[in-house]
Structures are given as C-alpha cells and as structure tokens.
Image (tube, rainbow, N blue to C red):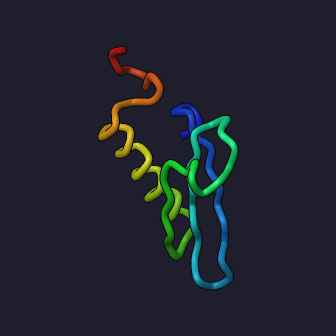
Amino acid sequence: MARQGYDVQLTRYDERGWRATFYTSGIERSITSATASAWEPTPWRATQRAAWEALTKIEEDGPMISLPGSNP
C-alpha cells in the first residue's frame, strides 16, 4: 500500500479487536482524512479489509495517483 501512496495506522482495542486505517501519504492524520478503515478480530484481517476498501474506492472515484501498469 505504501507504493500506492498510503500510510496505515493499526490500533488494538483490548480484547475487542483491531482497527486498521489507511491515509493518503503526507496528509495530516485525522478521522476526516482517512481513506479507508476496517474493524476486525485480528490485525491481519483488519489490514486486508481496509486495504481492499481503499483500493476499491480508487477504482470507483478514479485514481488519485498513477498506479503501476495504468494508463495516464
């Protein structure tokens, strides 16, 4: 995801689970600047689901950056 222009924040909430939040690189961190977020019981699943949501959002909105292999 770093190659796609994203930073990730992974937070553990006691025994309740994990939240992974992706942000566009270089943007100040706030909940309003979050690109995608997911809450899951394991850090792996939270990260995977949030990454999928971020990449799906790019496809729907059009790329904010040039993705490798894409036509400008």
Q: Horizontally, is 72 left or right of 44 in the view?
A: left
Residue 43, position as x, y percentages in the image = 58, 66
Nearest the eye: 45 or 6:
6
Q: Total of numbered circles in the picture? A: 0
In the picture as drawn, the residue positioned furthest to the top comes out as 72
Residue 6, position as x, y percentages in the image = 57, 40
Q: Is residue 64 above or below residue 19?
A: above
Please identify the quadrant where the C terminus is shown: top left
Which residue is located at x 54 percent, y 62 percent? 44
Which residue is located at x 32 percent, y 37 percent? 59
In the picture as drawn, the residue positioned furthest to the front comes out as 32
Nearest the eye: 46 or 28:
28
Which residue is located at x 49 percent, y 72 percent? 40
Residue 29, position as x, y percentages in the image = 68, 49
Q: Horizontally, is 22 left or right of 65 in the view?
A: right
Residue 35, position as x, y percentages in the image = 50, 48
Q: Is residue 63 above or below residue 17?
A: above
Which residue is located at x 65 percent, y 77 percent? 13
In the picture as drawn, the residue positioned furthest to the left comes out as 60
Q: Is residue 70 above or below residue 30?
A: above
Q: Is residue 33 above or below residue 62?
A: below
